[in-house]
Image (spheres, rainbow, N blue to C red):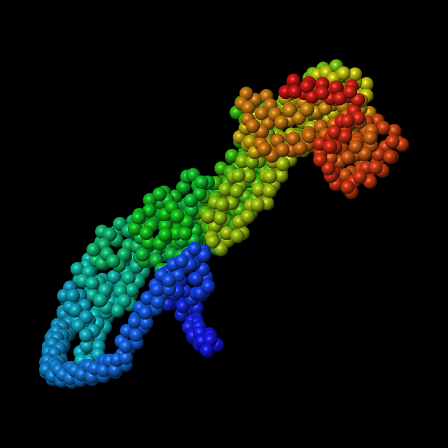
Amino acid sequence: MEDDELDLADELEAALHLAPEVQLAIEQVFPSQDPLDRADFNAVEYINTLFPTEQSLANIDDVVNKIKLKIRRLDDNIRTVVRGQTNVGQDGREALEEAQKAIQQLFGKIKDIKDKAEKSEQMVKEITRDIKQLDHAKRHLTTSITTLNHLHMLAGGVDSLEAMTRRRQYGEVANLLQGVVNVLEHFNKYMGIPQIRQLSERVKAAQNELGQQILADFEEAFPSQGTKRAGGPSNVLRDACLVANVLDPRIKQEIIKKFIKQHLSEYLVLFQENQDVAWLDKIDRRYAWIKRQFVDYEEKYGRMFPPEWCMTERIAVDFCHITRTELAKIMRTRAREIEVKLLLFAIQRTTNFEGFLAKRFSGCTLSDTVVKKAESPLASTNPFLEDDTSPEADDVTPEKADIDKPKKPKVPDNPFHGIISKCFEPHLYVYIESQDKNLSELIDRFVGDFKAQGPPKPNVDEGGAVLPSCADLFVYYKKCMVQCSQLSTGEPMIALTTIFQKYLREYAWKILSGNLPKTSSGGGGLTITSLLKEKEGSEVAKFTLEELCLICSILSTAEYCLATTQQLEEKLKEKVDTSLVERINLMGEMDTFSIVISNSIQLLVQDLDAACDPALTAMSKMQWQNVEHVGDQSPYVTSVILHIKQNVPIIRDNLASTRKYFTQFCIKFANSFIPKFINHLFKCKPISMVGAEQLLLDTHSLKMVLLDLPSIGSQVVRKAPASYTKIVVKGMTRAEMILKVVMAPHEPAVVFVDNYIKLLADCSTDTFQKILDMKGLKRSEQSAMLELFRQRLPAPPSGPESTSFVSLTAPTPEQESSRIRKLEKLIKKRL
């Protein structure tokens, strides 16, 4: 029996074992803190919780009664729930049946609504059918009435047009014809109707008759042969022009063509090729004649032609075309007679006349081809262009400027530019050859003036002056550029650029490089005796004050030429046609001026460097092993400082306007002087400890002077450029390290070699050999040192620096250590 109960309990436990998801859902729906509701309920733990001690068993009956009461309540709840679920199935079926009935009723109502809607739609269609028919009838009736009115107007208008044409009533015809043409456009879709087609043919016939009749009237008023009749029927012809606006455009063009041809016939006779007034020296008479014709036209015929025909401008344009053709023909015939002054005179008068046309007319009658040709050679913004010889350059109407903005802003648009002056372009080689000759003479004059006047006076207060010839050259370039840009912006500008390049190079070599002072091989130098006796000023620099100022002046001139040449290239590119811009390149000339600048700086450096050479030579000749005590700076240092103080302030003041090149001078001098100083330092051998201390003091003095070099002798103290300071510190620190290595004891050898590698970081055996020579070691000792040096080279300078330094100073005798401390105190005191 007990076994059966156990089996039943196991089955119940297995049946009540729920999945974790189900158990989690039950806990969320029915949250409970009762241990009996937990999924992992343990009866033993629960009993132990109820009876934790033996004394608590005294209440066992109460606990059992509470559990039984809870069981009975649970049974009652289960029984109630089970009974409540007995009729759930029956209730659900009833609810489903009720829902199905409600759906059937809903479908029935929807069907009824749909049927009623279809009936309503059919009823609306029947009601609106009649309304649509009435709307179509109304629209067709309106169209018919309008068409009949137009037909009536067209028929009456054609009859009136034919009658007025016969009576030459052009004033009434002008208004009527336009109306008839507009009405006829409404009948384009009815041309299949014979009557409409007949009316259209009558209109065309009337138009043709009007055109022929108007042309005949103009021919009668202005016959092709003979003189103009001033008493022509101007009122009739004025109305005829209004009619021509409505007729075929060819009628209008024919009237304009015949009138202008007849108007300019006198010009062709007066300025024939064989006439004396046709040559370039009397070109003013051509433009004076057409100006008188403008006045004559405005007085006699100004009111006859409509303003929109722009007859005055058309006369001017045809005059320009004829003049260009005639001038080109006569210049080809008499090409050998063309001179530069005559050509420039004709071009100037022509461009002035083109400017006059630009101020008076808008250029609206010019064809697209002519306008494009006129746009290409427009003048551009150019600082070289100071004075424009053409008065029209400043007077351009805003309307004309708004027609088509040029590519380069701030330039007035002159559509007439080049309309006549284009004919001079094939002959501009005369102008180019003349400029070549003039520039050659100008360069020769510059050379002669420089030789006659000599170098510029030294003026250290205002800085190095630019040579006056430089400004004269570029002023002449400006003039040439303005003239040539007015003549053409095509190949002649390229030819002129080539001429500019040629004489820029000649100026650089003949005027600038050719006048640089030459360094002489034999110059008076300082003797060792004079250096030791400190006879200051016993040597004069190789270049005099005037020569130094001349070099600085040439350098400043070359810098000005370099900057101005770059601007010249930019302005030439603005002047020339877009397709030719890539052929403008003055980089070679700019490089030439850069070479002049570099040579000038090199001369200044060589001069100061050469002035310091005797002092360095004296340093290397001194007996440094015999120096007994450390004193003030040596005489050679004083000599070097003296030369620096003599030259550098002059150079700095003369290069005040070009500070960057003064900085380059300082850098190049440092790069030249410091290696030379170190080379002479290696020649000082042997050196005693005291001699090395004196050299170290001298080196520090030179280092301070070099660091102060850019502002030496100046009342305004400026901080030296960082690039220059870096070079001086690096170079002079190496010299100091060399002397510190020389001062260090060579015993033990390993420590000496390691400290050499650490301080100098120089793996060259030649440098190490020179250090050993400076210390005065014997050849046998040097061989052992060199062998040890080669062995120690592969090994990096490992280990703390302090250890190596201690190893260096540890074996030093007390006397040598005290000397180093004295030297350090002396340097600090001088600082």
Which residue does the image show at 35% across and 43% down from the upper left?
A: 394
Q: Which x, y percent locates residue 757?
A: 75, 36
Q: Position of residue 629 (x, y in %)?
A: 76, 16
Residue 810 visible, this orientation? yes
Q: Residue at x 36, y 47 (%)?
A: 412
Observer-nearest of 274 and 717: 717
Among all residues in the image, which is located at the extreme front? 58
- Horizontally, is 726 left or right of 485 in the view? right
Viewer-side residue, 826 vs 805 = 805
Q: With 746 as the anchor, is 224 left or right in this view?
A: left
Residue 180 or residue 655, whichever sits in front: 655
Q: Is residue 34 visible?
A: no
- The answer to whether residue 502 is above or below residue 329 is above
Above/below status of 456 relative to 257: above
Percent position (x, y) of residue 821? 71, 20
Where residue 469 sits, quadrant-wise, is top right
The residue drawn where x is 75% and y is 21% is 817
What is the number of callouts on the image? 0
| Position of residue 227 measured from the top left corner of the image (x, y, whole percent) | 27, 58
Instruction: Please identify the quarter of the rendering in which residue 647 is found.
Output: top right
Residue occupying the point 77% across, 26% down = 810
Which image quadrant is residue 26 in? bottom left
Quarter of the figure that contains the C terminus: top right
